Image (tube, rainbow, N blue to C red):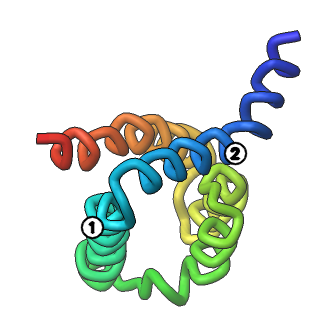
Amino acid sequence: MTFNVINQMMKWAPMGVFALIGVTVSKFGLSSLSPLGKLVISVYGTMVFFVIVVLGMIAKLVGYSIFKLLKGELLFAFSTASSEAVLPRLMAKEEGIGVQKHNSSFIIPTGYSFTWMAQLVPYTCCYF
């Protein structure tokens, strides 16, 4: 029963968001989309900067090229809009470069948990 309710919410959520944006645009005009566009650009820009610069530098210090190592996973996660889909592949890649299985099964899921919490930070900062 619970999964059915969640399934229905996931199916109808995009239409609800579209309707709310439509009401806002009809009430305040197209200029009301400007702050949303700025938010989207700043969030994606920050993520791209973090992946390319910060993670790239850390990977180079360790001796890996992050894009050669994770190219398939990055493309798959971006195209499916879900990083959870690549969880098993990331754990296998970690084990392939020498991380022990018990460490890999702890590090990646813990990182996912912290990522969920960290997603709130940019939106909170943008609010203020």
Task: Choose top left, top right, bottom left or bottom right for residue 73.
Answer: bottom right
Question: Does 128 appear above or below 2?
Answer: below
- Residue 89 falls in image quadrant: bottom right
Task: Give the residue number, with chain letter if any, for mark 2.
Answer: 15
Look at label 1 and name its amino acid. Answer: Lys
Q: Is residue 96 visible?
A: yes
Q: Quadrant of the C terminus?
A: top left
Q: Quadrant of the N terminus?
A: top right
Q: Which of disc 1 and disc 2 is earlier in sequence?
A: 2
Query: Which picture quadrant has residue 83?
Result: bottom right
The residue at 67%/38% (across/down) is 13
Q: Which mark is residue 38?
A: 1
Q: Closest to the observer: 10 or 22?
A: 22
Asked if the residue under mark 1 is in contact with the one under mark 2, i.e. CB atoms within 8 Å, the reply is: no
Number of on-image labels: 2
Choose mark 2 or mark 1, whichever is in front.
2
Q: Is residue 58 visible?
A: no
Q: What secondary structure is marked by label 2?
A: helix
| Residue drawn at x 57%, y 62% as measured from the top left | 94
Q: Which mark is residue 73?
A: none
**Pointer 1 local density, CA inside 10 Å: few below 14, some 14–19, many at least 20:** few
Q: In this picture, is 67 found above or below 39?
A: below
For mark 1, give the secondary structure.
helix
Amino acid type shown at disc 2? Met
In percent of width and height, residue 33 lies at 36, 62
Q: Give x and y (percent) for residue 106.
A: 52, 38
Residue 36, horizontal then vertical, whole percent: 34, 59
